[in-house]
């Protein structure tokens, strides 16, 4: 039996409340600080890159992208697509340009994706939106050295769902060469039984249909030798850490090119905030990934 099934509701909710696990500050302060850091980082990102904001990738009013172009793009640049976290109900692309400075300096195009937040968006819709956003952005560039995905928390879940997309119906096959998933959720079933599901209203069937763990064995055919980096923070909850470890183990067992990064002295929030810093270990992982020939 999965460990979460043995927990009472109170413990399950504690495990899936990342703000209650920070070693730096209390639960309200850590979220406030997180939004402040993302805002500051995105302002910096917008000051160092050329921006194309609110580019429509679909019909819905939230189906928009922010594109950050490096000052000196090459003829075949790398493209990194970022999916924000916030439990599919908070945050936005407007807070998602914080990782741009080191990547723009390296000549990488960065795209931040907006999707319908719950309760307006349900899980099937959100997953279909991020898949369409990837198909759309790839079609805008005739030459790319590769496509890379990055996602944090719920955004890592969405990135992992993109990896198990059958692109035949989209008329495009993105050349996804690498991904970095930070403190992600790969099995949605425990979420169904927590407060997180109040706005999402997922059934067990919805959760299974949208859980990346269910599709790991089909990924080899879809993504080939894509480099998959699964990262988790030392001060993530036991369940968040377990989700990352089990997803990494499943991906590796399926014969995919995977590695695991357990980041010391970090919590669920600063593990991603620090991507604004060039010397941060996961920024270095990203830069090596996107510049590898």
Image (cartoon, rainbow, N blue to C red):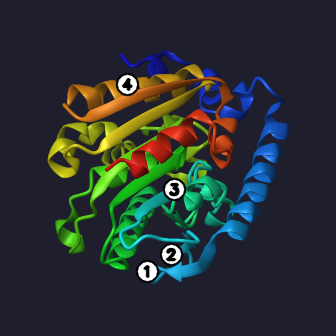
Image location of residue 86, percent across then percent down: 62, 50
Establish if 158 lies above or below 16.
below
Of tags 1 and 3, which is closer to the observer? 3
How far apart are the two marked residues, 3 and 4, measured between alpha carbons? 21 Å
Q: Earlier in the sequence, mark 3 or mark 4?
A: 3
Q: Are marks 3 and 4 in contact (CB under 8 Å)?
A: no
The residue singled out by tag 3 in the image is 83
The residue singled out by tag 1 in the image is 58
| Residue 283 visible | yes
Q: Earlier in the sequence, mark 1 or mark 3?
A: 1
Is 238 in front, or is 281? 281
How far apart are the two marked residues, 1 and 3, measured between alpha carbons? 16 Å
Q: Quadrant of residue 166?
A: bottom left
- Residue depicted at x 46% and y 59%: 80
The residue singled out by tag 4 in the image is 246
User: Alpha-carbon neighbours of circle 2 within 10 Å: few (<14), some, or many (≥20)?
Assistant: many
How far apart are the two marked residues, 3 and 2, measured between alpha carbons? 13 Å
The residue singled out by tag 2 in the image is 63
Establish if 249 lies above or below 35.
above
Image location of residue 190, percent across then percent down: 47, 32
Left or right for 87, reference 37: left
Q: Earlier in the sequence, mark 1 or mark 2?
A: 1
């Amino acid at each position: 039996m999965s460990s979460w099934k043995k927990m009472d509701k109170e413990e399950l909710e504690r495990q899936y409340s990342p703000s209650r696990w920070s070693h730096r500050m209390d639960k309200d302060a850590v979220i406030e600080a997180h939004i402040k850091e993302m805002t500051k980082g995105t302002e910096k990102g917008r000051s160092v890159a050329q921006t194309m904001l609110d580019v429509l990738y679909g019909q819905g009013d939230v189906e928009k992208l922010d594109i950050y172009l490096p000052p000196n793009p090459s003829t075949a640049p790398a493209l990194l697509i970022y999916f924000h976290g916030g439990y599919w109900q908070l945050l936005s692309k407007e807070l998602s340009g914080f990782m741009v400075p080191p990547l723009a300096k390296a000549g990488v195009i960065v795209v931040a994706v907006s999707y319908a937040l719950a309760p307006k968006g349900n899980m099937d819709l959100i997953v279909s939106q991020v898949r369409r956003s990837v198909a759309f952005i790839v079609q805008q560039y005739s030459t790319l050295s590769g496509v890379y995905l990055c996602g944090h928390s719920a955004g890592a879940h969405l990135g992992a769902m993109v990896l198990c997309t059958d692109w035949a119906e989209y008329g495009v096959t993105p050349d996804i060469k690498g991904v970095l998933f930070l403190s992600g959720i790969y099995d949605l079933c425990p979420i169904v039984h927590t407060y997180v599901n109040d706005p999402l209203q997922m059934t067990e069937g919805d959760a299974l249909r949208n859980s990346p763990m269910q599709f790991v064995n089909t990924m080899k055919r879809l993504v080939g030798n894509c480099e998959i980096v699964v990262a988790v923070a030392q001060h993530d909850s036991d369940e968040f850490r377990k989700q990352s470890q089990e997803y990494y183990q499943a991906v590796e067992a399926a014969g995919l090119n995977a590695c695991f990064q357990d980041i010391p002295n970090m919590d669920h929030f600063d593990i991603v905030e620090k991507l604004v810093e060039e010397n941060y270990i996961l920024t270095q992982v990203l830069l090596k990934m996107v510049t590898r020939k």
